[in-house]
């Protein structure tokens, strides 16, 4: 049985559904390897313009698989090369949307924070409880969380291990949008379809420049933005979009 199920809910949209319901979608090494394989493949697939990651109604992902970690040491952790799994998501050129219901804890919260947009059901919970197990986040849980919600809210969450609700996450800037639990995936699909209808090159440049600019001085970030904006003026899709606007018709984008 696949631990990650690939679906195509709309044109140009891929949906990856974590499939370990008996373990609340805990991120076992095998699941992470499957997720990596899908992301590497979808990153190269020109027909895909947006990717959704979700779990089920009870859990997005309730953390790492503790059974696989309880008796191992640092050498084994390094041999697993887990950063390659996370890197496939981190470096994906396509917009990634996390559709979160239920628990998004530990590695599950880190997985959600690897996305570009997070849609959360009203009952979702976000947290980094690693401290309760004598360890700490190792896939961006300290750095991404602090950048999203601020140093002081992040420190409170990390040092107590206490989760926050979807509403609290939204108010803190961690979540893009809140929906009723039953609407989380449909809303993510609607957002993905809207993105997929946009010029792919412009979408890719916006994502790349935003992420790169956040870690650069403002003047450098503005230079990156300006250069990317100018380069898009040489694309077919720019000419198509502007011509269609003037002709009052729908544009057809090719990603060139």
Image: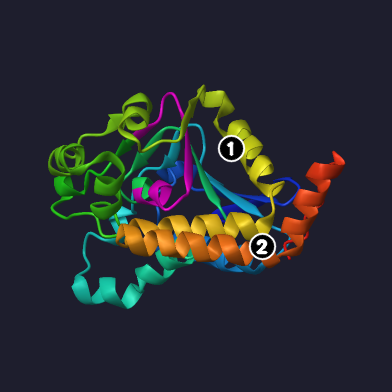
Quadrant assignment for the N terminus? bottom right
Mark yes or no: residue 93 visible.
Answer: no
Q: Is residue 114 magenta?
A: yes
Residue 92 tag number: none
Q: Are marks 2 and 1 in contact (CB under 8 Å)?
A: no
| Secondary structure of residue under mark 1 | helix
Which sits earlier in the primary sequence, circle 2 or circle 1?
A: 1
Residue 126 lies, in percent from the top left, at: 33, 37
Horizontal side, residue 222 vs residue 181: left or right: left
> How far, Cα to Cα, is label 2 from label 1?
30 Å
Residue neighbourhood size for the residue with mark 1, other residues' Cα within 10 Å, grouped as few (<14), some (14–19), many (≥20)? many
Judging from the image, the colouring scheme is rainbow
Residue 172 lies, in percent from the top left, at: 30, 32
Picture quadrant where residue 93 is located: bottom right
Residue 112 lies, in percent from the top left, at: 42, 46
Q: Give the residues drawn in magenta, as a range.
A: 110-125
| Secondary structure of residue under mark 2 | helix
Query: What residue appears at the point 63 percent right and 32 percent down from the top-left corner?
Result: 186
Give the labeled residue for mark 2.
233
In the depicted structure, whether residue 237 falls above or below residue 247: below
Mark yes or no: residue 146 visible.
Answer: yes
Q: Is residue 128 magenta?
A: no
Query: What residue appears at the point 60 percent right and 32 percent down from the top-left corner?
Result: 187
Quadrant assignment for the C terminus? bottom right
Horizontal side, residue 131 vs residue 225: left or right: left
Picture quadrant where residue 190 is located: top right
Query: What residue appears at the point 28 percent right and 48 percent down from the top-left corner?
Result: 147
Give the labeled residue for mark 1.
188
Residue nearer the viewer, 253 or 49: 253
Residue neighbourhood size for the residue with mark 2, other residues' Cα within 10 Å, grouped as few (<14), some (14–19), many (≥20)? few
Query: What residue appears at the point 25 percent right and 44 percent down from the top-left corner?
Result: 128
């Amino acid at each position: 049985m696949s631990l990650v199920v690939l679906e195509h809910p709309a044109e140009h949209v891929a949906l990856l559904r974590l499939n370990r319901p008996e373990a609340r979608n805990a991120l076992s090494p095998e699941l992470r390897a499957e997720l990596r394989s899908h992301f590497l493949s979808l990153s190269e697939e020109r027909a895909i313009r947006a990717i959704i990651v979700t779990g089920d109604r009870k859990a997005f992902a309730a953390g790492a698989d503790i059974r696989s970690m309880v008796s191992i040491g640092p050498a084994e952790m390094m041999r697993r090369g887990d950063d390659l799994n996370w890197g496939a998501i981190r470096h994906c050129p396509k917009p990634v949307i996390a559709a979160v219901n239920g628990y998004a804890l530990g590695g599950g919260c880190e997985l959600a924070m690897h996305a570009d947009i997070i849609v959360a059901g009203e009952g979702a919970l976000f947290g980094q409880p690693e401290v309760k197990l004598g360890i700490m986040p190792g896939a961006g849980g300290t750095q991404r969380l602090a950048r999203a919600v601020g140093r002081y809210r992040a420190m409170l969450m990390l040092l107590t291990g206490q989760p926050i609700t979807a509403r609290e996450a939204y108010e803190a800037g961690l979540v893009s949008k809140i929906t009723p639990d039953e609407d989380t995936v449909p809303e993510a699909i609607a957002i993905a379809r809207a993105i997929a209808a946009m010029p792919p090159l412009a979408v890719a440049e916006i994502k790349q420049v935003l992420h790169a600019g956040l870690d650069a001085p403002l003047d450098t970030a503005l230079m990156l933005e300006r250069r990317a904006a100018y380069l898009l003026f040489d694309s077919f899709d720019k000419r198509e979009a502007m011509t269609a606007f003037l002709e009052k018709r729908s544009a057809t984008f090719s990603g060139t």
